[in-house]
Image (tube, rainbow, N blue to C red):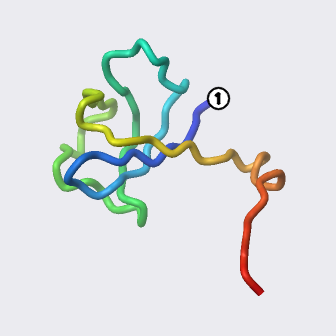
Amino acid sequence: MAHTVIVHIENADPFVAEVDKLPDPTDQFFACTNPRLRDGKPLHYITDEATSFIFPWHRISFIEVMPAEGEREQVETFFRD
């Protein structure tokens, strides 16, 4: 099952991508597909024809894992009245 993630890279805007499996702590790099900005626009530093991407861990600050559509009902959102 593919996971949607938001990747935060040092000195760059975060981007959304898909991963087949979540990375292991022993991985040397982060591999993803379909990277794009949060609003769906393409990343300016990636070629349009490329399909898979590998980023070294030292460039990544952190990764947010977004819930799947079925899990969204279980996620509690907090708001102020």
Identified at 73% across, 69% down, the residue is 78
Residue 73 vertical placement versus 26 (above, below): below
The C terminus sits in image quarter? bottom right
User: Residue 26's image quarter?
Assistant: top left
| Closer to the camera in the image, 50 or 22 | 22
- The 10 Å Cα crowd at callout 1, few under 14, some 14 to 19, many 20 or more, is few
| Closer to the camera in the image, 67 or 60 | 60
Identified at 83% across, 51% down, the residue is 74
Question: As drawn, which residue projects farthest toward the bottom?
Answer: 81
- Where is residue 10? Give x, y as percent: 24, 47
User: Residue 3's image quarter?
Assistant: top right
Q: Secondary structure at mark 1?
A: loop
Residue 76 vertical placement versus 19 (above, below): below
Question: As drawn, which residue projects farthest toward the front?
Answer: 80
Identified at 39% across, 15% down, the residue is 27
| Closer to the camera in the image, 6 or 48 | 6
- Where is residue 52? Give x, y as percent: 33, 30
Identified at 32% across, 22% down, the residue is 29
- Where is residue 53? Give x, y as percent: 30, 31
Question: As drawn, which residue projects farthest toward the top?
Answer: 26
The N terminus sits in image quarter? top right
Tell me the amino acid under the disc marked 1: Met
Q: How many marks?
A: 1
Residue 17 vertical placement versus 43 (above, below): above
Residue at image mark 1? 1
Residue 38 vertical placement versus 79 (above, below): above
- Where is residue 7? Give x, y as percent: 39, 45
